[in-house]
Amino acid sequence: MADPKDTKKPDAEMTTAQAIAELAKQLKPQTVYEKAGLSPARVAQLTEPTTPLRHRRVACKSEDTGATFTACVIESRTHPNGRIVALENYTHPPGTHTYRANGGLVPDQLQILRAGIGAPQEGDKVPRHDYNIFYLQWRWEEFWQKDLRRYAGKPLLSSHVVEPAGFKTEWIEGSAHMDETG
């Protein structure tokens, strides 16, 4: 006689939904790793990104836009000088608050300030909410976005650094995210 605590039904009494679920498990395609007979631990080792053991921060200047930033560089197997993963302390180049007619970089027809009263003096700190949104969009596309596309995820080259000695900045042990100094 069957144990009343045993809630599992015999195979003959399987519901349609249970039969479909069982069939789906059997028909599920195997991954390349499962076909090769690799253990779940080995699959994780092959597919999960590695944690960088060392990083460094290097002062850089964009060749395209003239902006300066600190590149956070992590160790990389494919790039001996490391891979740039973040642009920190990004500073726009001089002329981003000056119209082209006055020797700057801003198109003359683009309004810089919301109030529409000319342009701030170069170096003046202006609250972000005082800028015209179209100017902010232009500045983002012309500088920050271009530099992100050019440098993020790419190898660190000697032409990127501000000073040649910066290219040989010492590596710091540990992940860049664990570093409390940066």
Image (tube, rainbow, N blue to C red):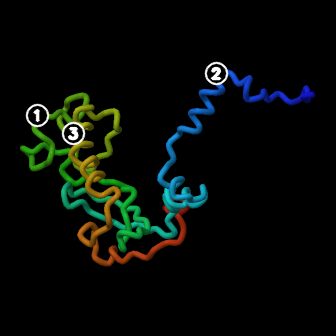
Quarter holding the N terminus is top right
Question: How far across and down, in percent of the image, does residue 164 sit?
Answer: 28, 76
- The mark found on residue 138 in the picture is 3
Q: Distance between the residues labelled 3 and 2?
A: 60 Å
Amino acid type of the residue that numbered disc 1 sits on in the rendered structure: Gln
Q: Are marks 3 and 2 in contact (CB under 8 Å)?
A: no
Q: How crowded is mark 3: few (under 14 residues within 10 Å), some or many (20 or more)?
A: some
Viewer-side residue, 57 vs 102: 57
Residue beneath the point at 25% across and 29% down: 114
Q: Position of residue 42 (x, y in %)?
A: 57, 61
Residue at screen point 64% across, 27% down:
19
Cα distance between the residues tagged 3 and 1: 12 Å
State the residue lying farthest toward the left: 101
Residue at position x 22%, y 36% from top? 135
| Disc number lying in front (2 or 1) | 2
Query: What's the amino acid at mark 3?
Result: Trp
Mark 3, secondary structure of its residue: helix
> Taking 117 as reference, is 36 left or right?
right
If you read the primary sequence from the N terminus, does the residue marked by circle 2 or circle 1 appear first? 2
Q: Distance between the residues labelled 2 and 1?
A: 69 Å
* SS at badge 1: loop
Hey, what amino acid is under mark 2? Answer: Thr
Question: Which circle's residue, 3 or 2, is located before the other in the chain?
Answer: 2
- The answer to which quarter of the image holds residue 118 is top left
Crowdedness near tag 1: few (<14), some (14–19) or many (≥20) residues, C-alpha within 10 Å: few
Residue where numbered disc 1 is placed: 109
- Report which residue position mark 2 lands on: 16
Q: Position of residue 130 (x, y in %)?
A: 31, 33
x%, y% of residue 171? 45, 74
